[in-house]
Amino acid sequence: MQLAANTALVLIDLQRAIDDPSWEAEGPRNNPQAEGNVAKLLAAWRRAGKPIFHVKHDGTFATPTYRPGQPGNEFKPEAMPLPNEDVIVKHTNSAFIGTELVRKLRLAGINTLVFCGVITNNSLEATVRMAGNLGFETYLVEDAAFTFARKDYRGHLRTAQEVHDMTLANLDRAYCTVTTTSEVLAGLG
């Protein structure tokens, strides 16, 4: 894999809210190494001087985990933006809805996006699908993303890894290319 010179790294919802125990009510998350891989990607992007977009979810529901003014609204230490890096604030699951993300990407001539973050089957999936639909060359770094166990439509409990893997299967080759941290780092040059 060789990434285009104008490839942007997009980090989705890597905020302290995701560490709230309520997220693991149905079972533990997968990919405990995800934040470490995010940190590797972020460091490599900064060294290369490539564009970075941090997406922050400002929750509007009564649950306090992502609401502004709450501790959970802050970025996780591994994904803390630098002052010169773009922060896109969203209020829905897709980072493209009601934000300036697509405009900023188009103005900067960015056509290739590498995504990491949370939750694989929620905000990450919604944003990756839309990126593919908007015509961006899109990559999803599967080991720099995670989700949680949840019940399926029929009420059967699925592990976080099963939920993650099914989401990746739905996205790969239809909306994006699923890849790994090591493949992206190698492609960064």
Image (cartoon, rainbow, N blue to C red):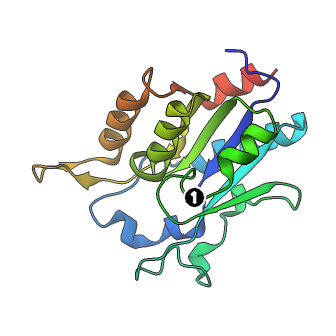
Q: Amino acid at mark 1?
A: Asp
Q: Position of residue 129 (x, y in %)?
A: 46, 37
In the rendered image, the residue lying farthest to the left is 154
Q: Measured along the vertical axis of the image, is residue 24 above or below residue 171? A: below
* Left or right, residue 8 beside residue 180: right
Give the x, y percent position of residue 114.
Answer: 64, 34
How many numbered marks appear? Answer: 1
Quarter-wise, where is residue 45 in the image? top right
Q: In the rendered image, is residue 71 in sight?
A: yes
Q: Is residue 41 visible to the viewer in this orientation of the structure?
A: no
Vertical position of residue 70 compared to residue 38: above or below = below
Towards the viewer: 172 or 76: 172
**Could you tell me which quadrant the N terminus lies in?**
top right
Q: To which residue does mark 1 refer?
A: 13
Residue occupying the point 52% across, 73% down: 66
Residue 136 is situated, as x and y percent measured from the top left of the image, at: 61, 29
Q: Residue at x 59, y 29 (%)?
A: 138
Q: How far across and down, in percent of the image, does residue 171 sit?
A: 41, 30
Q: Looking at the image, which is closer to me, 84 or 151?
A: 84
162 on left or right of 80: left
Residue at the image point whose x is 57% and y is 71% from the top: 58
Crowd around label 1: few <14 · some 14–19 · many ≥20 (10 Å): many
Q: Secondary structure at mark 1?
A: loop
Give left or right: position of 17 versus 5. Answer: left
Q: Quadrant of residue 62?
A: bottom left
132 w.r.t. 125: above or below:
above
Instruction: Describe residue 88's horizontal placement relative to residue 66 as left or right.
Output: right
User: From the image, which quarter does the C terminus lie in?
Assistant: top right
Q: Is residue 185 above or below residue 45?
A: above
Point 53% across, 78% down: residue = 67
